[in-house]
Image (cartoon, rainbow, N blue to C red):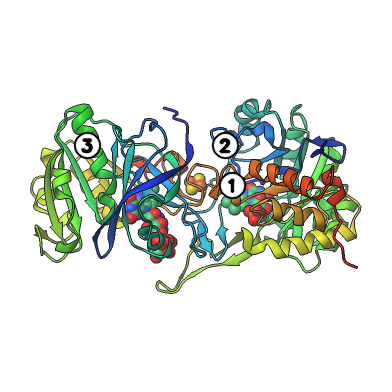
């Protein structure tokens, strides 16, 4: 599907601090959104940050077509995300969007969504989409560092069953997402897995999915320069050669990746 | 009436703003953002003899006012280009110029010969920053005799406008420029990326899989301006200047240093519409300075 990409100033409706390391940016577009799909991302232009030369990519966290707003869930990393965290209501943010492919639509109801860290970001949009467009009630497994970072559970719960695991066990089970009982004991009830998070986590999930013959899609976060397919900086090795994470991805079926 | 057009070795560009190879894909990717017909030309990404998968990820590191890349000329090879890409780009309403790369002299000659047959491609740009695998990996563009040899070998098979794009990683850029002009270059493009390196101190590892890579963006503009100026004084052929151009003022600086046209590279990643904004900005500058043509700016730096 070829939707026209836009370079556009959106405006901040809300900037919500969730905890020490995360905030939500709600942005309103000047005109009706084109079709946006779960898994797609935006490239944000960070102004007034001399050390932030390139745009910064963020997944679409949720979309409200009625009010023409979208949300980004952002983890503070360096100067770029710090400057975005200072944006105030009414200020513009220039985006190039929508970018990338999307998660595919499952042929089954037995769907598991796994997110770790800021990898939970695209899963809210995905669960919303599965529920509203496909009447699927997904199971979600969300991994966080610690209790303070467990946020928006009510939001995810509107679209499916949510399970939480924290690194330190302060909420839900203790450990990494792959340590959760849902994965250790209950993985065979699922026919499709969608995962997003740090690459070591995705590789571990891909391995488990492979062993249990479960179809698995992961969303990658390779560093990017352009985000729209022209620089070839973001590639990942696939069975058919190096492919661009920003165009052929960010979502890849793990069968396609050269991870073994 | 303001005239933005320039004549480069007999080829007319409707304005002096073009886009740099490797930063503009095949042009097609920008059609959502701009009307390609508003540009003087587009330089499409490197074409080599055979399919190349490029280097391993990571291939990019952001640096102060710029970036390093080690893409490694990933492309599907000249057959694929002629069969699949050319039909899609040949009717763009602008000059479409192909960047020709290789790892042996024979490969350059082969690719240039094939592109010569494509009626709607009026020029090629030889990228001589590539390492010569037969001569220990030394880049063609860093030794005057090698630069001259590859230029004259291509000149024999290529009948249209021959541009040669110089590497800045040399002691004397003027010497290389003279060598390629002696070899038959009609036009000189400069500069390609500067060799650089980025280190992740926490991991104590290089950021790029190749350890070193090519630096581009505003960080290299002063070096590029200096080299355009030196080449302008050294050889009589037209120059296409680039390196860190982000806006119309940067472009004007390159004209003053001696460039007849410019290329916009890394800036396309940050603002995919920047090239057409630069066209408008140049026009605005000419109006403000009561000039009727860009030609009056070329090499017009006042040094008295
Ligand atoms: C397709 C895609 C979607 C993304 N979605 C989200 C999202 O929804 N929410 C979110 O918070 N982040 C997301 N990211 C990661 C986000 O883009 C980076 O964290 C951000 O660019 C860091 O910018 P900075 O200037 O604050 O930090 P920098 O100063 O650039 O970097 C600080 C540290 O973060 C690391 N870093 C930088 N870029 C990345 C990256 N792409 N992946 C992993 N580590 C990186 C650097 O190595 C460095 O150690 C996404 C990345 C991609 C490619
Ligand atoms: C990602 C990337 C890929 C590039 N690929 C090529 C290439 O294939 N052939 C070439 O001659 N130059 C290539 N270049 C160099 C640019 O064309 C240009 O010479 C250089 O980036 C300096 O200009 P800039 O600072 O405006 O980007 C590439 C640059 C970048 C950033
Ligand atoms: S980031 Fe430029 S091609 Fe993907």
Q: Could you say where residue B207 lies in the image, as x and y percent from the top left?
A: 48, 64
Cβ atoms under marks 2 and 1 closer than 8 Å: yes
Q: Could you say where residue B15 lies in the image, as x and y percent from the top left?
A: 76, 39
> In the image, what residue occupies the spot 82% across and 48% down?
B260
Q: Looking at the picture, tell me which residue is in the foreground, B144 or A166.
A: A166
Label 3 in the same subunit as label 1: no
Quadrant showing the N terminus of chain A: top left
**Which residue does the numbered mark 2 point to in the structure image?**
B30
Number of the label disc, if any, that sits on residue B92: none
Chain of the residue where label 3 is placed in the rendered structure: A
Q: Looking at the picture, tell me which residue is in the foreground, A135 or B287.
A: B287
Q: Is residue A49 left or right of residue A115?
A: right
Label 2 in the same subunit as label 3: no
Number of the label disc, if any, that sits on residue A128: 3
Relative to B178, say whether B42 is above or below: above
Determine whether the residue tagged by mark 3 lies in a helix, strand or loop: helix
Cα distance in 3D space between marks 2 and 3: 32 Å
Chain of the residue where label 2 is placed in the rendered structure: B
Q: Is residue B201 left or right of residue B245?
A: left
10 Å neighbourhood of mark 2: few (<14), some, or many (≥20)? Answer: some
Q: Would residue B284 be visible to someone looking at this image?
A: yes
Cα distance in 3D space between marks 2 and 1: 9 Å
Relative to B81, say whether B18 is above or below: below
Number of the label disc, if any, that sits on residue B268: 1
Cα distance in 3D space between marks 3 and 1: 34 Å
Relative to B95, say whether B155 is above or below: below
> In the image, what residue occupies the spot 40% across and 71% down?
B203
Chain of the residue where label 1 is placed in the rendered structure: B
Q: Looking at the picture, tell me which residue is in the foreground, B137 or A70.
A: A70
> In the image, what residue occupies the spot 14% across and 66% down?
A168
């Amino acid at each position: 599907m070829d939707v026209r990409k836009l370079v556009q100033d959106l405006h901040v409706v809300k900037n919500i601090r969730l905890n020490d390391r995360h905030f939500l940016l709600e942005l309103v577009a000047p005109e009706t959104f084109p079709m946006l799909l779960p898994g797609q991302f935006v490239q944000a232009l960070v102004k007034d940050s001399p050390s932030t030369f390139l745009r910064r990519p963020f997944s679409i966290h949720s979309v409200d077509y009625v009010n023409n707003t979208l949300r980004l869930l952002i983890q503070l990393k360096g100067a770029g995300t710090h400057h975005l965290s200072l944006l105030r209501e009414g200020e513009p943010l220039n985006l190039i969007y929508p970018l990338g492919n999307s998660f595919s639509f499952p042929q089954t109801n037995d769907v598991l969504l796994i997110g770790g860290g800021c990898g939970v970001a695209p899963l809210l949009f995905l669960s919303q989409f599965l529920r509203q467009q496909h009447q699927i009630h997904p199971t979600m497994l969300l991994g966080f560092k610690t209790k303070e970072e467990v946020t928006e559970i009510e939001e995810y719960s509107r679209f499916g069953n949510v399970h939480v695991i924290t690194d330190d066990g302060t909420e839900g089970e203790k450990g990494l997402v792959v340590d959760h009982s849902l994965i250790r004991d209950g993985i065979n009830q699922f026919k499709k897995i969608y995962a997003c998070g740090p690459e070591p986590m995705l590789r571990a999930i891909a391995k488990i999915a492979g062993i249990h013959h479960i179809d698995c899609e992961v969303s990658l976060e390779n560093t990017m320069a352009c985000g729209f397919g022209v620089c070839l900086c973001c590639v990942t090795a696939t069975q058919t050669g190096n492919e661009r994470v920003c165009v052929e991805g960010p979502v890849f079926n793990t069968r396609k990746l050269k991870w073994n | 009436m303001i005239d933005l057009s320039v004549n480069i070795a007999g080829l007319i560009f409707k304005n002096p703003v073009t886009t740099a190879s490797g930063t503009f894909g095949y042009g097609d990717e920008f059609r959502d953002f701009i009307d390609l017909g508003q540009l003087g030309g587009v330089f499409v990404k490197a074409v080599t003899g055979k399919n190349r998968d490029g280097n391993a990820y990571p291939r990019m590191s952001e640096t102060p006012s710029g970036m390093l890349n080690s893409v490694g000329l990933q492309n599907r090879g000249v057959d694929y280009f002629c069969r699949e890409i050319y039909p899609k780009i040949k009717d763009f309403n602008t000059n479409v110029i192909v960047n020709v790369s290789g790892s042996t002299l024979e490969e350059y000659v082969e690719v240039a010969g094939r592109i010569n047959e494509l009626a709607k491609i009026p020029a090629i740009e030889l990228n001589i920053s590539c390492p010569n695998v037969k001569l220990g990996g030394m880049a063609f563009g860093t030794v005057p005799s090698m630069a001259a040899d590859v230029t004259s070998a291509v000149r024999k098979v290529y009948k249209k406008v021959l541009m040669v794009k110089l590497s800045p990683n040399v002691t004397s850029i003027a010497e290389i420029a003279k060598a390629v002009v002696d070899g038959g270059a009609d036009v000189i493009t400069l500069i390609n990326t500067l060799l650089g390196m980025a280190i992740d101190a926490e991991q104590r590892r290089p950021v790029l899989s190749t350890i070193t890579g090519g630096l581009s963006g505003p960080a290299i503009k002063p070096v590029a301006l200096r080299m355009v100026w030196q080449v302008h004084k050294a050889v009589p052929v037209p120059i296409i200047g680039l390196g860190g151009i982000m806006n119309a003022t940067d472009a004007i600086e390159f004209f003053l240093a001696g460039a007849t046209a410019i290329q916009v590279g890394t800036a396309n990643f940050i603002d995919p519409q920047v090239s057409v904004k630069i066209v408008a900005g140049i026009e605005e500058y000419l109006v403000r300075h009561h000039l009727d043509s860009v030609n009056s700016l070329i090499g017009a730096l006042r040094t008295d």
